[in-house]
Image (cartoon, coloured by chain):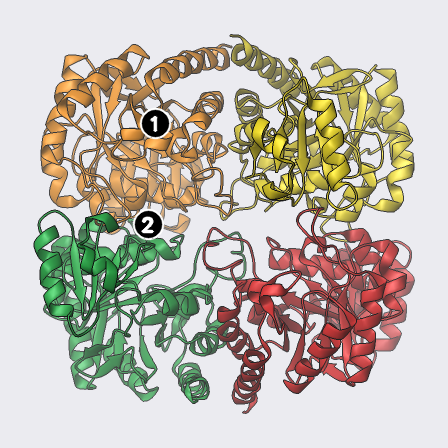
Chain colours: A green, B red, C yellow, D orange
Amino acid sequence: MIIILDEKKAEKKIAELKKIFNGQKQIFVNDNRVAIQGADVNELPADIVATAEIITDVPAAVQGSRLFHPQDTVIKTPHAVIGGAEFIMMAGPCSVESEEHVKKMAKVAKEGGAKIIRGGAFKPRTSPYSFQGLGEEGLKYLREAADENGMDMITEVMDDEHVEMVAKYTDIFQIGARNMQNFSLLKTVGKTNIPVALKRGMSATIDDLLNAAEYIVSEGNRQIMLLERGIRTFDNKYTRNTFDLGAVPVLKKLTHYPVIVDPSHAVGEWDLVTPMALAGAASGADGMIVEIHDEPTKALSDGPQALKPKTYLKMAQKVFEVHQVISKK
Amino acid sequence: MIIILDEKKAEKKIAELKKIFNGQKQIFVNDNRVAIQGADVNELPADIVATAEIITDVPAAVQGSRLFHPQDTVIKTPHAVIGGAEFIMMAGPCSVESEEHVKKMAKVAKEGGAKIIRGGAFKPRTSPYSFQGLGEEGLKYLREAADENGMDMITEVMDDEHVEMVAKYTDIFQIGARNMQNFSLLKTVGKTNIPVALKRGMSATIDDLLNAAEYIVSEGNRQIMLLERGIRTFDNKYTRNTFDLGAVPVLKKLTHYPVIVDPSHAVGEWDLVTPMALAGAASGADGMIVEIHDEPTKALSDGPQALKPKTYLKMAQKVFEVHQVISKK
Amino acid sequence: MIIILDEKKAEKKIAELKKIFNGQKQIFVNDNRVAIQGADVNELPADIVATAEIITDVPAAVQGSRLFHPQDTVIKTPHAVIGGAEFIMMAGPCSVESEEHVKKMAKVAKEGGAKIIRGGAFKPRTSPYSFQGLGEEGLKYLREAADENGMDMITEVMDDEHVEMVAKYTDIFQIGARNMQNFSLLKTVGKTNIPVALKRGMSATIDDLLNAAEYIVSEGNRQIMLLERGIRTFDNKYTRNTFDLGAVPVLKKLTHYPVIVDPSHAVGEWDLVTPMALAGAASGADGMIVEIHDEPTKALSDGPQALKPKTYLKMAQKVFEVHQVISKK
Amino acid sequence: MIIILDEKKAEKKIAELKKIFNGQKQIFVNDNRVAIQGADVNELPADIVATAEIITDVPAAVQGSRLFHPQDTVIKTPHAVIGGAEFIMMAGPCSVESEEHVKKMAKVAKEGGAKIIRGGAFKPRTSPYSFQGLGEEGLKYLREAADENGMDMITEVMDDEHVEMVAKYTDIFQIGARNMQNFSLLKTVGKTNIPVALKRGMSATIDDLLNAAEYIVSEGNRQIMLLERGIRTFDNKYTRNTFDLGAVPVLKKLTHYPVIVDPSHAVGEWDLVTPMALAGAASGADGMIVEIHDEPTKALSDGPQALKPKTYLKMAQKVFEVHQVISKK
């Protein structure tokens, strides 16, 4: 249930509601809107029922819902504003391969207009025998690469025990698709004040994704962005996944969190990335994240989808142009 | 197998190959490229093996493949050029509901820059008890609406027995998603010289779609365009289908046929259509087809996805702008 | 809406209802149950509203629904009873390859307890260049094979224009998965009195399947059986499709038509067929259809899934045993 | 690569191979079979190349592969043998709701022939606001219920930090579908010597599942069983998931781990569970796990799919009969 109070008397009524329900039900407050989990209209005081607007059909992921929080969430990192007027470019290598390489890629990323550098230090590999990442050493190189270029850093944290360590380096936590329902991890990053980029699971419905985000915000961390990276369907011969761009306007309608698109993992082939990046920008996304590599055939992970610097620069320029076109009134 | 001959001596060698294989194997010729279905390299004359480039890994849908036909197919209808430099807009009501209504919608469509009016006279309804369309009367009204506005007409033909009748009215046959593997119907329209817009089946792989197109071209009709209209996946609560825009660059790579996108059927909700139309234009499609209606709540079919005139006009303007941005060098 | 009348006064009230609605609404009668398409309760006479049980939440595919027709539909062909107490085995080659071969396979089929021989004379091939079947000649051989062994015949009819010809030979029409929504074909076979085996489309929902069946019964043919043959999902590396056995009890609950399973097309590999045939029998299906071939590597179509005679005989024996176990009280 | 050595000289050659590769490549030994991750044939000694059978096309999940370990893995818990000749029944409530309830359900489970009682103390709920389980208290009650009835216990462990605690109570760890790719958790349970029941993720391919199992065995724990519980597809109106029974024979072919089926989560509705349990037994599974509850409408989780005691007892009896039929030669 969401109660939209008259703005003038909101404070008093909010106090009243907290008194009635506190301890028994979950109560969330956003300005003049109060969400009460699992409460009935007949538990409310008569004056509120009479004067307030009450919405009963409310999703479980209530704090993430625009019914509760109509205004866009805007996330500020040291060098970027995500969810605002600007289209945010995040770019970098799939894995942090070496100090030299990630610093080289950071320069390329920056040149294309990226404000955030990506790179994996802990890699979720399908096989336990594949390269698993450089670990803390990789985080260190990525941090330096970001600092040298006046950029922010985003990197994946894969388990609870690494959250504290990764927090020392990163500006944004990335939660991988396979961990979207690792509820324990979601709660742990939810207890920090570091922005979280939550990747949609490969067969997560929109509701699954929003419920996963709710695990994060339920611990107090409101700085959440959602990542569409392709879903798993029968159509998997020519593309790694099916890029579900329809999810972008659906999410922008249902939730206030910024929506980022990841064309690299969606399509899995470098020559399909640019059209999908352009489509992603045109669909209304707040930003995108893309993998780049100067020598894709030598990449330690996901080589086939990495963009060479020249391709990346052309793609980025066009993406900003498309965003400009769809943004103007 | 595809044999790429030296352009100078091509004619002579093509004659040679026809002599060897004719009657036994299917042979197709495009300029200096010869495709021979089911032949082995060791059946070829030595001089051809020595001088020509031979591609053995060739898809079954060979005539549709860029390996056989590298140049884009451009389809010319009386008022439009599909697959060329211009982005083609096709718009109109889902069904032809009445003479007055379709003519009113034709004006709106034209105003938004559409060159082709759509409308269904024979509707493929999931239930046999739903409105099935106006039949030939509907074709007549749609034809008049097109003529009055200097536009071309596209309409669905649902079975073999109606092909001849629909051919008298339409500039383009549309083959619906549910009929994508109605091989009999594909062959029948393949015998005509009317362009065919082939909709991708709701769980058709890219190869299925290309093989279906091959049924059409195998009867002689080369004027084929492919329509992406969303595929069926687990993600169906907020959108009718999953709009597979990744299919656009994949198809542009594999085949020479123009690629059209249908955001209306893909998302199923009017307020999701514009972002998906923009994304479709940005993905590199050659055109789009969209449903419009002045009073969607009263539409006889697919009301929820229809765009009101004002929304359509705004969407169309932005779509052409996006296309312009991605087209320039 | 379905009205369940008091059995004593049913006849009189049915006449009353027909008088009120005839010509305007579709009315269907089964014993004391009357289904009226698209009618409102307030259009009914007061006495009926007072005395009858009225179900308003009724599927579009009303004639197929157990709410309208609670009793099982039992289909009798010259040599078999489908939908009764007995588990029906249908077996045969994928394609009728030659007179000799189909007659040889008929004997094997019979030996395993099959009462119905299958074989395709018109093959729905993904590529137009593949073997398309022997046509009428194939029908003739299959008919003779059936007659020589005291069996019935089931074969696929692929388009309207062949219905009349195939009707001269077959005991059961098979409508292929790709034609499940070929509404024209469904109506044509619906006009005959030959039983129809309707294959579920590869991405047809349960409702899609029931609606397709409704197209058949809407033309008067009540002798329909439904075939589960696997659906298309992301899981397609080791099996051709995903065998959706959950559909069997769902269909037995919702509809009165017999349910047949096709493990051959579902899994696509011969060594997976037996476990799936056993599972199909255990799931409560009324019968199964399986492909057999004495030399699968030489089969003209679908070789990998064909069972050799010895495998077939062992499988069939076990299938009947499993059916016996689950049937006893 | 897998090298199958002559059994007589195996020991000596194994020592030789370990000497060559140790430290550089992963080497696994099973009897006379040696698997070497990422090695080339040309790195092998000539005598081995000459005398041994070498398989190069080997899956990444090599220790789980029958190519490496042809013999079935049989897991022995105090009261059960899983993967042997006997069909193993595991039953119990979805959640441990109270001491009284779980002990009551344990008796019912036992009566139906179950040797293992299930119950969740830590529930993976889609929403953070739902009942999350009784925690350690729940583990305690489940342990007592098991002991009172001479049964073993299986329960889900959801994160690394709880592994040690759950290990004190349970005979089998269950890893939930949403955690199938929680690689950190897989490695942690892999370090224990407690059998692990790994649930297939809702859109995990067969290879994904086997690779996840490989994470467990890579840490030394060979006691793994795989659970098929339904996959996510478009077909989700009447069933919660699509029960992929085709996966059972596929897994039995590819891997040596026991395969268990979970019809409860697959279909989500109690009246569909029995047919699917029977089908699961008929498909060749080594056992099944089912949810029971005496008052499903009052269940704290997953009420709709729970079997009442009477239904469970009937189902179990039939399941054992079906297993008997398919097991005899």
Query: In this picture, is C215 found above or below A121?
Result: above
D100 sits to left or right of A86: left
| Front: mark 1 or 2 | 1
Q: Residue at x 85, y 72 (%)?
A: B13
Residue D68 at least partly seen: no
Q: From what the image shows, is residue C118 above or below residue B268?
A: above
- Secondary structure of the residue carrying tag 2 is loop
Q: Residues within 10 Å of mark 1 (few under 14, many from 20)?
A: many
x, y percent for residue A19: 7, 55
Question: Which chain is mark 1 on?
Answer: D
**Residue that appears at 46% across and 35% down:** D243
Q: Which quadrant of the figure contains the N terminus of chain D?
A: top left
Residue with the mark numbered 2: A127
Question: Which residue, given by chain and number where applicable, does mark 1 sit on?
Answer: D306
Q: Is residue C6 left or right of residue B73?
A: left
Crowdedness near tag 2: few (<14), some (14–19) or many (≥20) residues, C-alpha within 10 Å = many
Q: Quadrant of residue C295?
A: top right
- Tell if the residue under mark 1 belongs to the same chain as the one under mark 2: no
Residue A280 place in picture, x, y as percent: 44, 74
Amino acid type shown at disc 2: Ser
